[in-house]
Amino acid sequence: MRSRELLGRLAGQRHSQLALAAVTGAFTGLAVAGFDWIAAQHLLDRLYSAPVAVQVAAPAVGLILAASALWFVGGRASPATSDEYIRNFHEPGVRLDLRPVVGRVLAAMATLGLGGAMGFEGPSIYMGAALGTGLQARFRRLFDPVDAKVLMVAGAAAGVSAIFKTPATGAIFAIEVPFQDDTAKRMLFPALIASASGYLVFVAFNGTAPLFPISGSPPFGLRELAGAAVLGILAGGGARGFAWLIKTAKGWQQRLHPAISVVLGGVLLAGLMVASRAIYGQSLTLGSGYNVIAWIAQGHHALWAIAVLLVLRAVATPATVVGGGAGGLFIPLVVLGALLGSFCGTVVHEPTLTLFPVIGVAAFLGAGYRTPLAAVMFVAESTGRPGFIVPGLIAAVVSQLVMGRQSVSIYQSARRASPLEDRFAMPLTSVIQSDVPTVPSQATIEELVEGHLLATRRTTVPVVDDSGFVGMLRVQDLADTARDAWATTRVCDVLPGDQPRAQIGWRIEQAIRLMDECDRDVLAVVDAGARFVGIVTTADMVRLDEILSTREQEDR
């Protein structure tokens, strides 16, 4: 009888989770429809008809507004959107931080609505993940620890499904994108339900027309299949280069002062816009790139024109990233794939210029995000032509081989990790000791020993001054100082020159590697301003009881 009651309770819990997934999808579809109505229909569409001078200046204004939103509303949050979903997916026991949501959404609205060269799917995924996280927190009693990310994944799936009107793509992308060679387990059914409900709500406002309507049937023969394989090779190489550009741009954006990064990104985007108007008479570097797809569909273009536009668009997105713009990389990959396919189709004199651009999309997108299944499904759903699946699949698979281990997201994992790997992938904040006494750098050794070492029984003490963290002083560092000099020797005078430190945003694995290289059991953690945050120890990071507890939960 007890077994029946338990099974009935588990079944009821599962049904409640699926119902909440449907609710998450519906709310996400509504949120994405509102975002699209403001950013795309009332800002970007009007920008395309504005004077050229306004179009040249608009992306820089968008970056300024985005930086302001992230700084003042988002609490100095990063511009990450879809990357924030991928990063949090790999943080067991850590809920997606909802405090920066409004700031990030406003930043994305300013970036995309004023012509930044990024995709609308980034904020759509992020809004869905945030809505799912908030709803699951409200009904957390219905979820086991192993299902802690279910509604976050469901919301992300609904975001992709809504913005692209591709319900199957949304579900597949959400469970495929966190990994390079794997998918998220136990997430497919909730993701499918959320995708369906998100799609239905969105199309109720925006109609069901495919994103890229294509008429006729694509040719299908050995020539096309061989061309798909060659295009896959080219797309894999191109995606590797684009991933390097994105990572470099993100590195610059993090290192540069916010004002400098905004100016640099704005100037680059303005220059690209001027070049586009001079060469094509159109604003083809402005916005996500749907206008580029329309340009391709207009008919045959000169090879040099396609190649130059490919370069301009490949630079426009990293320029937006450097400037701190908030948005996604899905559509930029789609646009680059379409341009590469158009180039190849022109070389081989493709009569309709439909097949090669479409399979170029599948190859470039699948390689860039390491999501071949979602890329092929996106091609079928967004064009309304399932005949593109076979050549698209061939191109996507070949491009994966060429792409290797590269990706446009730095937070992807190769596969699902073991419990020990999960532990090492957790954020360093989960093991930080923040209530650690510090000693001023101008204190004497005598004050250090009597007021800190003897009182706290610690053998390592953090040293700070007005500017932030100075170093970690160990007991053995006092060995060369005579006892009678303790009263006059300052702590800063005996600090060793090499002072390793961990950053607050690191994962446990990064800290362990640094501790191993420096032969330290205790490591200081600092924030972006070099202020002392706390310490981590090897004992805290490898507690076997927590690892075994995680394994027991997964085996249930």
Image (cartoon, helix red, strand yellow):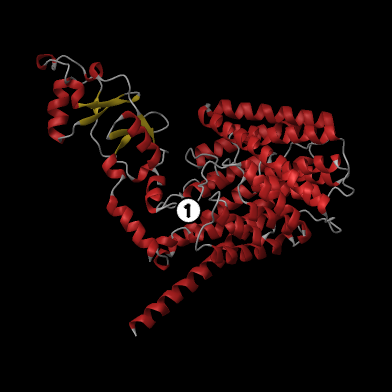
> The C terminus lies in which quarter of the figure?
bottom left
Q: Callout 1: helix, strand or loop?
A: loop
* Circle 1 residues within 10 Å: few <14, some 14–19, many ≥20: some
> The N terminus lies in which quarter of the figure?
bottom left
Question: In front here: 327 or 361?
Answer: 361
Q: Which residue is mark 1?
A: 416
In this rendering, position of residue 394 left or right of residue 189 = right
Residue 148 image offset from top left, x and y in percent: 43, 59
Question: In front here: 140 or 431?
Answer: 431
Residue 508 image offset from top left, x and y in percent: 37, 42
Name the quadrant containing residue 307. top right
Give the answer, above or below, for where 482 lies relative to 400.
above
Residue 165 image offset from top left, x and y in percent: 69, 59
Give the answer, above or below, for where 90 lies relative to 269.
below
Give the answer, above or below, for where 155 lies relative to 106.
below
Q: Is residue 276 visible?
A: yes
User: Which residue is at 13% across, 33% downward?
Assistant: 455
Q: How many marks?
A: 1
User: Which residue is at 49% across, 68% downward?
Assistant: 17
Q: In the rendered structure, which amino acid carries the disc numbered 1?
A: Arg
In this rendering, position of residue 181 left or right of residue 506 = right
